[in-house]
Image (cartoon, rainbow, N blue to C red):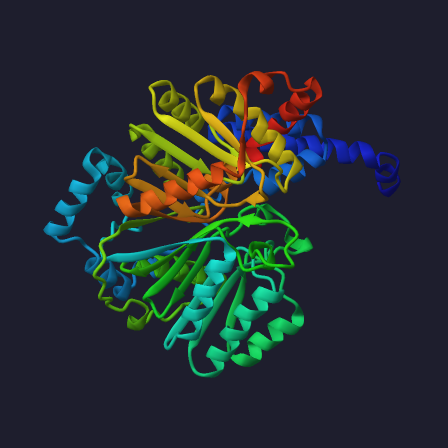
Amino acid sequence: MIDFIKDHFWSILIIANYALAISAIVTVLLKNINPTKTVSYIIILALFPFFGLIIYYLFGQQYRKTKIFNRKHIINSNIIQSASKSMKMEGKDLRKINEKLDDKIKLVKLLRASERSPLTVRNEVDILFNGEVKFERLLTDLNNATKHIHIEYYIIKDDTIGTKVLDVLCEKARNGVEVKMSYDDVGSKLTSKMKQRLNESGVEHFPFMPVLFSSLTGKSNYRNHRKIAVIDGEIGYVGGINISDNYVNNESSTLYWRDTHLRIYGEAVKVLQFHFLTTWDFVTEASIEIKDSYFPETICEKDVAIQIAASGPDTDWANIMEAILTAINNAEHYIYITTPYFIPNDQVVTAMQIAAKIGVDVKLIVPKNSDSWIAQHATNSFLEPLMEAGVQIYRYSKGFVHAKTMVVDEVFSTIGTCNFDNRSFNINFEINALMYDIEQSKLLKAKFLEDLEDSEIINLEDWIKRPRFDKLKESFSRLWAPML
């Protein structure tokens, strides 16, 4: 028997590969997912032995359907139920929102169907442009914390800015402030020395879904891309800026980094707190004590209406993508989108094309030079049909644009972690703040128009004449679009 296996080792491996591949293909077919994605997986499984199986097990599993992210303990908490009730709008608040939104009320109704996305009214916000502005405010708020600090980030590095943040966390923990920190195990880099410092200072910290060579399955794909900071339950941060030197523009920067973040004071912070606690419940794998102090009553005189939309394997629906689609479909005057990764699904492409064709001013800013070769070429493959429909596309050339924003008709705007790609829409954990406020929309619109001055518009006629080899690279990269 052993001799037979030795003599036919590779044949046995090939047979085993295709037996598993056939099983995977049947599974993909039965899921009835997007046909393009289905065909992509079938081609890879059929034509690339072994490699195809690796790709499938890394990217093909649907955790939203398998419900491995259990949130029942958190959702059923009496304290959270009480906090949710306290956010219910009074009649005068609802009338005020109706006046602001006019016929954009459909967007609110979409997310209000989810108990996790209540519409909050009593909020004060500051839009923070670029990392150097965000970290100045964040460090001040962290230093002023008296009760608790909750941090959840895709990228936390113990480089210069990261060490400044971590130093404050350690100091606060030593002084009796509760500090909890969750970081994605793929995106973050913390040295053993820093982890030891955190432990000795009393900072509770856990990696999100650790990836080990012995357990490399779909866990390397479903990453926590959220960026949340909650301070004393009153101040919250959400947006595109991770904790790393890459996001700060100073004299030592080699690349200008254009990004956007949001600081919130008010009721919407309770929703950010909820999402942090659900993640914390998952990463610690233990019951968490939910305290009343996590959800304090805040006195806020401002009335910026905000919904916090989260999506990922822990949500039943692709909430952020649905919100974006609804906003695009309801636009009457303009849609201005900034994203570092633009690899959209058919629904988003069609919605943008229809909006442009009926006269809506649709503009898109993407990086001129991406940090991913395959993502940049995949993005390029989507641009021509959009421009043919009248969408104006600009490539940011001052540096790298990482902001993830959209503003529509000076009524609706969103800032968050979600890119315009399949990974953000359907695979990773993402979170966005949806704002219904004229003043904030005008600020984002003004910044968008300012960014256009540092961008190059793509001319359709010139774009069509680009080298055939470039088109081939784009077509090849687009084959991977459902998995990027």
On-image quarter of the C terminus = top right
Q: In front: 339, or 131?
A: 131
Can you name the residue that lies furthest to the left here?
A: 91
Residue 41 visible in the picture: no
Above or below, 48 relative to 142: above
Q: Tell me what residue is drawn at x 29 percent, y 43 percent.
A: 111
Q: In front: 358, or 234?
A: 358
Q: Tell me what residue is drawn at x 65 percent, y 59 percent.
A: 252
Q: In front: 201, or 138?
A: 138
Q: Tell me what residue is drawn at x 58 percent, y 38 percent.
A: 397
Above or below, 35 relative to 109: above
Above or below, 8 relative to 118: above
Residue 470 shown left or right of residue 250 in the figure: right
Residue 424 shown left or right of residue 48 in the figure: left
Q: Position of residue 465 (x, y in %)?
A: 63, 16
On-image quarter of the N terminus = top right
Residue 217 shown left or right of residue 150 in the figure: right
Can you name the residue that lies furthest to the bottom here?
A: 175
- Give the quarter of the image for residue 86: bottom left
Q: Position of residue 272 (x, y in %)?
A: 36, 58
Q: Tell me what residue is drawn at x 73 percent, y 31 percent.
A: 15
Above or below, 388 relative to 282: above
Q: In front: 270, or 38?
A: 270
Please count the marks in the image: 0
- Give the quarter of the image for residue 462: top right
Q: Position of residue 148 (x, y in %)?
A: 39, 73
Residue 95 visible in the picture: yes
Q: Position of residue 254 (x, y in %)?
A: 66, 52
